[in-house]
Image (tube, rainbow, N blue to C red):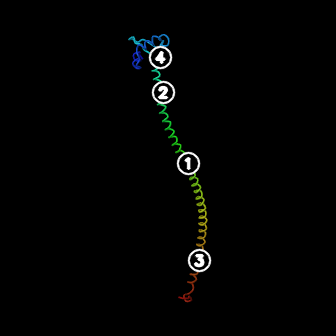
């Protein structure tokens, strides 16, 4: 930055800046000021900071502090928003965990109920098999008995036909 730019940017008087440069050129400002082609002096960051009056530095510090305060306020707002979101998320998570517990209990109940029903089904299946087997035996016995009765009927019919009609009753 040139001396002219420094004076314009911070509303400083050229005479005051040049006086401070000449007084500190060989000591504090040594190596921080270079001459430009047009005889203007080029200042590095250290020289600019050194040449600024205290009230300008104080104003810069105040502006920097205000910027930090604004940034802090923004961060505080973000933090509060994040805390609200975290609280809501925590409530949702707690509700989801409670719902999950209820669902797990319901699943256990349904598994138990299903187990009982399967047990009943197995008992009924066994009972049905036993009854079916008993019924099949009874059917076989009845079919055998029918067969025997049919055979008796056939034999009796043959005997009846062997008797002459003359001796038969009601004919």
Q: Which residue corresponds to mark 3?
A: 149
Name the foreground residue: 153 vs 61: 61
Vertical order, 135 against 44 (above or below): below
Q: Which residue corresponds to mark 4?
A: 50
Q: Mark 3 or mark 2: name the one nearer the start of the chain.
A: 2
* Mark 2 residue element: helix
**Disc 1 versus disc 4: distance between alpha carbons?**
66 Å
Q: Mark 3 or mark 4: name the one nearer the start of the chain.
A: 4
**Disc 4 versus disc 2: distance between alpha carbons?**
20 Å
Name the foreground residue: 21 vs 98: 21
**Disc 3 versus disc 2: distance between alpha carbons?**
120 Å
* Mark 3 residue element: helix
Estimate the x, y position of residue 170 in percent, counting from the top left.
54, 88
Q: Mark 4 or mark 2: name the one nearer the start of the chain.
A: 4
Vertical order, 63 against 126 (above or below): above
For the point 39% across and 18% down, the residue is 8
Q: Which mark is residue 65?
A: 2
């Amino acid at each position: 930055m040139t001396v002219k730019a420094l004076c314009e940017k911070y509303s400083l008087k050229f005479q005051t800046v040049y006086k401070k440069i000449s007084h500190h050129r060989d000591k504090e400002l040594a190596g921080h000021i270079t001459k430009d082609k047009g005889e203007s002096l080029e200042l590095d960051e250290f020289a600019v900071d050194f040449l600024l009056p205290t009230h300008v530095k104080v104003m810069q510090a105040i502006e920097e502090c205000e910027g930090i305060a604004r940034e802090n306020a923004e961060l505080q707002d973000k933090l509060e928003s994040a805390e609200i979101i975290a609280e809501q998320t925590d409530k949702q998570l707690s509700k989801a965990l409670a719902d999950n517990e209820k669902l797990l209990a319901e699943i256990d109940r349904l598994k138990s109920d299903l187990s009982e029903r399967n047990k009943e089904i197995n008992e009924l299946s066994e009972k049905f098999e036993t009854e079916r087997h008993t019924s099949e035996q009874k059917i076989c016995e009845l079919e055998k008995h029918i067969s025997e009765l049919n055979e008796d009927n056939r034999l009796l019919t043959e005997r009846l036909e062997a008797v002459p009609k003359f001796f038969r009753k009601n004919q």
